[in-house]
């Protein structure tokens, strides 16, 4: 089917997932697709309900096998306990409802009735128990096990100090799953968006390679793994045995596979109508798109839940001096930074939590580290270093950054020289060298970033605790983080505690917050649907459950 004759819709919840929708149909022309979903009035024919995009090839399609070596498409073919919508609200998936005990330690999940695997076997609570045990089994070496450290005995099982049967995940019956945590863990439901079930029968029959071939793969999600031609193409088809709440409009999703060492020609493929969606990775491409009348209408930008910041060893001179840290925070013009070195790929950061993230209140924190070179020079003098005199030479370490981030660091270098008279040498280090120094608190001055792991303030603020990776200690911050972590029954109070904690972080200049990256994407004008309408934060975004990529939540 040629693109001008089709329109793609990307609806998902209340029984929909992703689909293609062209005009020309009226209500009488509505049809039911191959898995029993009634299509919108203007939907294209079933044979045109195919979404095409690129995908980095991984080694498997099992979430509890590997999150770093797996493929993002695995979120389309396996059912987690919980999903999220475009507004990041939690939605039922494998679990139709859940609750927590009064002490905040025992979570109960009621499994959706009627779920089944694609081989026809019913899916029940025992399958989720098996999946969590597989994730904690040290023989499996699951690289995402850190997500579930709060589950009772999880780390002891991973560390071979307890048998796997002691894990705090169990099922009193087929329709009930219980998860016990070591301490109250109010963010557990957010983590369970990463609980995509593993079919025990497939592992027992085919071993660990069950999820590396379409022929041996057993699905439980909205799509089936239909075909996987290595280094070429992966095809998903709508799953007729899926009876969960996320039934798709789409008939197929076709992924063109690539490996990181050989990235695909995104823009050329998009312009040749070979794919329906691409990320825009380079500023030069972005400039070209913005001057193209057609492409600029298909360009969509939204902020990532990532923060770049300057970090300092505040436990030792010279950065144990609060006034010095404050001087640096006021010497950087973030607005100029994102309009020059980071043009169109970032927005200013005034705090750790990005706009739209739970607990984020950047406007309330904006003034604390505002650009004010006069105040910066005054604070530098009060710190004992007038015009930078007496300050030891500074090296700003980077973590194996690319050209855009390196250019931004050099712009910061120039701002510190211009505003404060401070000379800084920028060094771009190998990643391991940087991280070893950071984690051992041997890094004096650096620039890095942190990407959220899950949609909760603790994901981004927790790394600033005194026992974390940063050489910064602040007792009031620690107490607020602990108190928030114990607050299960009152989510509004919990968010307020995190806001107070972040205010302490920004005010004590644990870090100098610089920018939040923006994702720029292109999708065809025939891609439509509720999921691509602006969310409650005003962004039109192509997102997924964990990172901002396409999954079954769209």
Image (tube, rainbow, N blue to C red):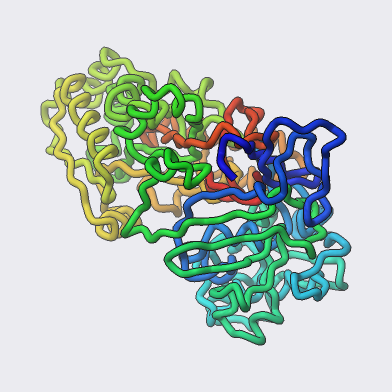
Query: Against 270, is 106 above or below?
Result: below
Q: Picture coordinates of residue 290 (x, y %)?
A: 39, 24
- In terms of image quadrants, where is residue 158? bottom right
Using the image as rendered, state which of residue 401 and residue 103 is in the foreground.
401
Q: Residue at x 62, y 78 (%)?
A: 216
Q: Residue at x 61, y 77 (%)?
A: 215
Query: Against 90, is 517 above or below?
Result: above
Query: Against 473, is 145 above or below?
Result: below
Q: Picture coordinates of residue 180 (x, y %)?
A: 73, 64
Q: Is residue 255 visible?
A: yes
Q: Is residue 499 visible?
A: no
Q: Residue at x 13, y 37 (%)?
A: 392
Using the image as rendered, state which of residue 554 and residue 523 is in the foreground.
523
Using the image as rendered, state which of residue 91 and residue 60 is in the foreground.
60
Using the image as rendered, state which of residue 67 and residue 213 is in the foreground.
213
Query: Against 490, is 538 above or below?
Result: above
Q: Quadrant of the N terminus?
A: top right
- In terms of image quadrants, where is residue 496? top right
């Amino acid at each position: 089917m040629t693109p001008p004759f089709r329109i793609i819709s990307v609806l998902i919840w209340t029984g929909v997932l992703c689909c293609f929708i062209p005009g020309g149909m009226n209500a009488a022309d509505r049809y039911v697709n191959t898995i029993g979903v009634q299509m919108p009035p203007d939907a294209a024919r079933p044979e045109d309900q195919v979404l095409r995009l690129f995908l980095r090839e991984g080694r498997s399609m099992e979430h509890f096998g590997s999150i770093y070596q797996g493929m993002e498409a695995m979120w389309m073919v396996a059912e987690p306990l919980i999903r999220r919508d475009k507004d990041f609200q939690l939605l039922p998936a494998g679990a139709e409802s859940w609750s927590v005990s009064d002490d905040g330690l025992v979570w109960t999940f009621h499994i959706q009735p009627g779920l089944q695997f694609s081989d026809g076997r019913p899916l029940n609570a025992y399958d989720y128990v098996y999946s969590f045990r597989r994730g904690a089994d040290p023989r499996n070496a699951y690289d995402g096990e850190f997500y579930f450290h709060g589950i009772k005995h999880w780390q002891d099982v991973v560390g071979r100090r307890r048998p796997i049967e002691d894990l705090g995940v169990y099922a009193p019956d087929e329709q009930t799953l219980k998860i016990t945590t070591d301490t109250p863990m109010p963010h557990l439901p957010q983590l369970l968006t990463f609980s995509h079930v593993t079919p025990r029968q497939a592992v027992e029959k085919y071993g660990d390679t069950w999820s590396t071939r379409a022929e041996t793969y057993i699905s439980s999600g909205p799509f089936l793994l239909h075909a996987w031609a290595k280094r070429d193409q992966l095809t998903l088809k709508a799953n007729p045995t899926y009876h969960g709440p996320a039934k798709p409009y789409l008939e197929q999703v076709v992924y063109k596979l690539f490996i990181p060492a050989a990235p695909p020609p995104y823009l050329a493929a998009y312009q040749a109508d070979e794919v329906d969606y691409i990320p825009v990775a380079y500023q030069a491409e972005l400039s070209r798109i913005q001057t193209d009348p057609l492409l600029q209408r298909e360009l969509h930008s939204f902020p990532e839940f990532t923060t770049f910041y300057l970090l300092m060893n505040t436990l030792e001179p010279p950065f144990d001096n609060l006034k010095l840290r404050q001087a640096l925070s006021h010497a950087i013009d973030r607005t100029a930074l994102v309009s020059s070195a980071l043009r169109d790929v970032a927005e200013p950061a005034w705090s750790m939590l990005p706009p739209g993230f739970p607990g984020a209140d950047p406007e309330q924190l904006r003034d604390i580290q505002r650009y004010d070179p006069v105040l910066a020079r005054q604070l530098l003098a009060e710190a004992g270093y007038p015009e930078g005199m007496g300050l030891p030479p500074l090296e700003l370490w980077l973590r194996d950054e690319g050209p855009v981030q390196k250019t931004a660091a050099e712009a910061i270098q120039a701002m510190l020289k211009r505003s404060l008279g401070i000379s800084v040498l920028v060094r771009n280090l190998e990643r391991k060298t940087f991280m070893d120094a950071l984690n051992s608190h041997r890094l004096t001055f650096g620039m890095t970033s942190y990407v959220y792991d899950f949609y909760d303030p603790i994901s981004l603020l927790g790394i600033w605790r005194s026992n974390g990776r940063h050489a910064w200690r602040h007792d009031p911050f620690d107490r607020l983080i602990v108190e928030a972590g114990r607050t299960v029954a009152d989510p509004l109070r919990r968010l307020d505690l995190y806001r107070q904690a972040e205010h302490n972080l920004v005010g004590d200049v644990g870090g100098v917050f610089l920018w939040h990256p923006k994702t720029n994407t292109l999708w065809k004008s025939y891609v439509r649907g509720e999921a691509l309408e602006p969310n409650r934060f005003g962004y039109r975004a192509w997102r997924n459950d964990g990172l901002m990529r396409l999954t079954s939540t769209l």
